Amino acid sequence: MMKQSLIASLALQLTVAVAELLPVQIRAPTPLHFRDIVSNDTYDFGCRAQARPTSDGQFELHALLTRDQIDYLTEEYRSVDVISIRESVVKRATTAPIGSGDRFKSGTVTPVGLGTQTSGSTIASIMNVAEISSAVNALAANAGATSFTLPYKTFNGATQFAFQIGSATPHLYLSAGVHARERGGPDNVVYWAADLLAANKSGSGLTYGKKTYTNAQVKTVLGAGLVIFPLVNPDGVTYDQSSSSLWRKNRNTKSGSSGSSVGVDINRNFDFLWKFSKYFASSASPASSSPSSETFYGTAAASESETKNHVSIYDKFPKIRWFMDVHSAAGDILYSWGDDDNQATTTTMNFLNSAYDGKRGITGDTTYKEYIPSADQTAIKKVADATVAAMKAVGSRSYVSQQSVGLYPTSGASDDYAFSRYWAKSGANKVYAYTMEFGYSTNFYPTLTEFNQNILDTNAGFMDWALTAISVGLE
């Protein structure tokens, strides 16, 4: 009854206005205590809902809620002693500013990453949308990158672009900026590319905090070839940077024309078990069909131009073997699968088998678990663990590696789509896929110190991700 009461009440609370979101921590003795809360698609749990263990043996779930939602949830669970809801009372420093103007001067000034600068160097602001394009143009004009235009324009008419560095046959693919509010993602990938190209040219290595890399390692990474899609959601980022509203989705108004009903969650729009009401158990909530939800999945699989452009890169570069989608804010590296627990014994228990429709998404049961070959499981976990070790070694904070599903499933995500192509699309290359969630839980707007530390953490992570992936194999 509590679950139905929550959904009915919070559905009435939804309005066309975008209400202020406040950080909240929900604590309970086990992750199972959060199931009813997580299944409600009116809540915002950041990139994905995750239950984190605490030092006192409890678990903590981070959320971004409106004042009405906090008040309602607090009252609903007032008599449930084992569940507590509290607002964050930590006073944060001013968030990192968004750049004004164009520091790269229409593509004539080359971006310089932190890995090629002296220790303690910093970058003064997050790139605005125009600067991301200008930075890529500068890398193409001055540093040896090759940029190219993607085939579909966004809902607001933006022309999208990506770029290559290193070998003309890319085996490594990175994307960023899928969720608009996750500030710093495009900066992380652009500055890393700038570091690789600069170090290659000068014959030097790279240094990220306590992690160092030789010029030989730089050349090894470039030799694998990289393609980078630095800004997947330009419409959403433009809106978020102007409004500071913690906007997540794109700005498509076909399903809703105002407030929270605008937009589609691009990371629930990929063609992997997209129609979740068919494929998942009714009690699972891997996405949402409500336009007002932060996880609204769109009107069809790959309905969005941003999703189509993301997928087009696999078709343009069919030798891609390793993929990383860069997000925030949680502090982890996630690997496939995200729809259910992994298993390596029953090959017929897989996402293509309609016999299991309506049974997926309940973790910890025996009814359904997603098949993954044991060799693939070993390979993807080895690379994830190496990535996390590198990010920890920088010296700033702890990261963890884990399967994407955790305790709560997702559908239509970029990483699972990438990995699924091998089985779902005839002739497609096998792609080992990851989601990197840098930063701290629901801390989407970093301070300037955090922004610079995130660059160091992610760039070291990218290096070891690439180097370990290369050692596992590119073919």
Image (cartoon, rainbow, N blue to C red):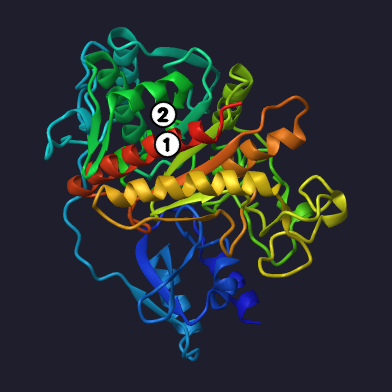
Residue 130 visible, this angle: no
| Quarter of the image with the C terminus in it | top right
| Residue that appears at 69% across and 60% down | 361
Amino acid type at circle 1 is: Gly
Amino acid, disc 2? Pro
Q: Are marks 2 and 1 in contact (CB under 8 Å)?
A: yes
Q: Secondary structure at mark 1?
A: loop
Which quadrant holds the N terminus? bottom right
- Residue 385, x across and y down, in percent: 46, 50
> Image quadrant of residue 375?
top right
Residue picked out by circle 2: 230
Read off the residue under disc 1: 177
- How far separated are the C-alphas under marks 2 and 1? 7 Å
**Residue 11 seen in this snapshot:** yes
Does residue 133 lie above or below 366 as drawn? Answer: above
Q: Nearer the viewer, residue 344 or 244?
A: 344
Q: Is residue 86 left or right of residue 178?
A: left
Q: Residue drawn at (83%, 56%), measured in percent from left and top?
A: 356
Is residue 83 found left or right of 206 in the rendered image? right
x and y, in percent, of residue 441 in the image: 37, 59
**Against 394, is 14 above or below?**
below
